[in-house]
Every structure is written in structure tokens, then in C-alpha cells.
Amino acid sequence: MLTEKQVRYFSDWKEREAIAEQMLPIIGRLYRDNDVVITIYDRKLVHQSTIDILRAHRFARQILENELSVRDTMPVLQAVAKLDLAPARIDIGKLTVRYQAQAGNLDIDEFVRQELKEINTGHKPILSEPRDVVLYGFGRIGRLLARILIDQTGGGNKLRLRAVVVRKGSEDDLVKRASLLRRDSVHGPFMGTIKVDPEENAIIANGNLIHVIYSNDPAEVDYARYGISNAILIDNTGKWRDREGLSQHLKSGGIDKVILTAPGKGDVPNIVYGINNNLLNDDERIFSAASCTTNAIVPVLKAVNDRFGIVNGHVETCHSYTNDQNLIDNYHKKSRRGRGAPLNMVITETGAAKAVAKALPELTGKLTGNAIRVPTPNVSLAILSLNLEKETSVEEINSYLREVSLEGPLHELIDYTNSPDVVSTDFVGSGYACVVDSCATIVQGNRCNLYVWYDNENGYSCQVVKMVDYLAGLKLPVLPA
């Protein structure tokens, strides 16, 4: 016979599950009809399951020190749905907490109306017409970029992935490309449906027709043949990294901007989204999204330097193995990388510490860095050993970084965890540039060690897409302010 407490817990669960199920169509309708993205403390609820919604509410306990219930957020969501909104990101967690704090001075509909008055102006397209995107290369990063872009299609008036350009591998190349997009050993199955259209030589993913174009020369692709114009091209091959090489993409017509998913050489601007966006201007046509490690460490370094000042330091990265290493021992032009990646820790170089100076000139010459490739397929860990201008404590620096992850200009980049049991696989799929592991923080006077996790595939890909959004003019207002 069940105890009273067992009955109470299970009844509570069933009730909350039912409420979360009722939230799904409201969240979906707001996204499709109004391009409104609903979040809870920056966790996106669009395209999520009932369980995902409940887990996102559970996450809020890290911030609020108690769980935020769907019983509280559902009335807020319903009030949001009554408005005729322009495109935006709306955090119903923060709205709920603000509503509770005002202690009934306003009814919930009036409160939400006032909080969202700047976007309660009727739906209007974000762009006059969808912006074309082309992927040049379709490897690990290329396929993740495709997944993210498809997921963000919404009502179809934003970014549209029009084509991927690859070298033809075999007669069944199209089927194999579609299969690799459909199934991923690290990130799991594609969330949606995929089929191929042999007549168009295209992949159809969640209704998006994506041409697969075969070419060995970026300057010879006839994009006009596919109706592609004014496109943003993302080169994720890494084959060309300087201006001369990347400029080949601009010669064939149809391409307006080029983004490289690797550190750029020469005068190519290296961008860490959210840090030096001032370099993303209309006068420049070629950009680099820097490296995954640079994107992971720069936001935390900026936050720490702004508050405590950094005298100097060292960055050590435990990085998952990548495709440029050998599975088994064999010749490799670089030292150590010829040894079997799944079997060894491999000391190698990283340019991330020097690359920091391109995004944060104030740290020029202050950091050294190195990397160890480790036998995991994804998720890496950066250890920031810093000497600060001011003395601090574990409690002070963690509290500060927690606040930075919630509010202010870096909250989209930095996530925060206070769990003592997290390991690398817990961060597979993280869409943040980095996650501060507060339980690992070490401080002694003005010396501190910060441990920063990052999904070096998906987190980096999300940063790249944010760059594309910015270039396309798709930066949504985030409310409540």
C-alpha cells in the first residue's frame, strides 16, 4: 500500500506534467506565428518535450534556491499569448519572479502587458525577405550548423539554409550525406524528418529544401542556378584561412559575406560573438569565428578582467580529440598527433591564448597556453590559472560569475553550474560558449583557478550562428529587460 507521501509526490508530478503538456502548443504557436522564442532563465522551450520543460523549471533552483513551478509560469505564458507580439525572446521565468515580487499590485494580464509593451505592436516580419545561407563543407561543424539553422527556421522569414557545397564522394553521396545529418554518434538523432530529392540533388529536412552542390573550386559554383543571392556563406572546411583564399567564395556571385569556422590569418577579423561585435560591419565581407577554445575562454576572461583585473595567467585545455588526429598510430605531419587518439592523452599546441588578444587587446602578452588532446569525442575543459590585481575568494568570484551568467551582456555566452558531480558528458549539446564549474573554483589571495567546460562542437556552432544572425539583422530583443 502506498504511503501518503508517495501518493502526494506522484499526484504532484502528474499535475505538473499535465500543465507542461498544455504549454507546448502555446509555445509552438507563438514561435510559428509571431517569431517569439519562449525561454526560462535562458533555457529555450521551443521544440522541447514535456519533460524538457519540467527540467528547465527544475534548473531554476540553481538561481532561485527553490524550484520554479509550471503552476507559476503557466498563467504568465497564457497572458503572453493574449498579446499581439513582435518577434522577441521572452523569459517567462524572469517574468514570473518579477510578477511574484510585485505582490499583487497588478493582475497578471496587466502586469505582462506593461512588461512587454515595447513589443506589443503586432506581428511583423523580422526581415523583408529570408536571408540565404550556404554551408561550404559538411563535416562535424557543418552538420551541426545545419541542425541549428533548420531548428531556427520558424515561420520561414528568417535564415534559410539553401545549399551545402562538398566534393562528391561516391555515386550514393546524397544518401550518405543525408544519413550523416540524420544520425550522430555524439549528438543523437536529428529532431525531425529527413528525406532526399534525387531530381534536385537535395536533402529535405523539416520541409527545408537544401541543395547539395558538388565542387572542388569555390570560385566556380554557380549559385544563381539555384536562386541563391546575397547569401552568407560559412566555410567550415578550414582549407583557406586568409583573405586571398576566402575571397574565392565571393567571385562566383550570390555570396555577400563569408564566415570561417577557424582562426583567420593575416588581416581577417577574428570575432568572438558577444565580445568584439563592433568588427561585424557592412564594410567588411570576410570574417573568422575564431576557434572553439577562444570562444570558450574569452567571455570568462573578460568578465574576470572587468571586475578583478588580470595581471597574467596560463590557459591549459583538455580538448577532445578531433578529426585531424589518427585513430591508430600512423604518420602525421605534426608532432604526437600521429599517435592513436582514442588511446592517448596527446600534448599539443593551441593558439587560443594568443588569439585572446585579438578579441581583448587589454590582455595582449598576459597569457600563455597549451592543450592536451584527451580520449573523449566531444566536450572540452579549459583551466584558467590567473594572477589577479585584487584579492578575492571562492565565494566572491563564484557569486560574481553566477550573476554574469544571468544578467548583462555576457549571459548568452556564459552558463554556470554548482553541481559537485558533473562530468564532461553532462555538457554534450550545451549551446553556450562555456560553462563555469563553480564547485571546482580554487582561490588563494589574488591567485585563482577557474574550470570552464565547453561543447567544442555544438557550443561553438551556436556562436557561429549568432554571428550569422547578427550579420543578417536578426538580433531579437530579450525581455524582460
Image (cartoon, rainbow, N blue to C red):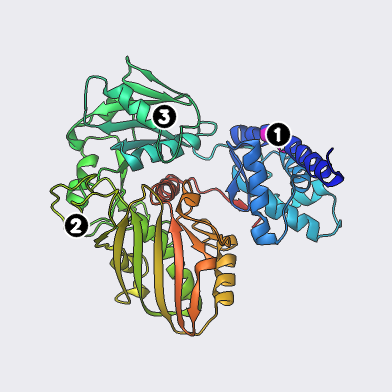
Marked residue nearer the N-terminal end (3 or 1):
1
Category of crowding for the residue at label 2, using alpha-carbon neighbours closer than 10 angstroms: few (below 14), some (14–19), many (at least 20):
some
Judge depth for marks 2 and 3 and give the one in front.
Answer: 2
The quarter of the picture where the N terminus appears is top right
Q: Position of residue 213 (x, y in %)?
A: 27, 27
Mark 3: few/some/many CA within 10 Å (<14, 14-19, 20+):
some
Count the numbered circles shown. 3
Mark 1 closeness class: few <14, some 14–19, many ≥20 residues within 10 Å: some
Disc 3 marks which amino acid?
Answer: Arg
Q: Please state the horizontal and vertical placement of residue 301, each as a whole percent of the image.
A: 43, 69
**Mark in front: 2 vs 1:** 2
Horizontal side, residue 116 vs residue 271: left or right: right
Judging depth in this view, the residue of 274 and 321 nearest the camera is 321
Spatial separation of the CA atoms under disc 3 and disc 1: 26 Å
Residue matched to label 2: 336
Q: Which residue is mark 1?
A: 21
* In this view, 295 is above or below 389: above
- Range of magenta residues: 20-24
Residue at the (22%, 19%) spot, across then down: 171
Q: Which residue is mark 3?
A: 182
Does the image show residue 119? no
What's the residue type where badge 2 is placed?
A: Arg
In the image, residue 213 lies in the stretch drawn in magenta: no
Furthest toward the front, the residue is: 1
Q: Is residue 267 left or right of residue 42?
A: left
What element does badge 2 sit on?
A: loop
Q: Could you tell me the amino acid type at mark 1?
A: Glu
Q: Looking at the magenta stretch, what is its main secondary structure?
A: helix
- Pick the front one: 16 or 440: 440
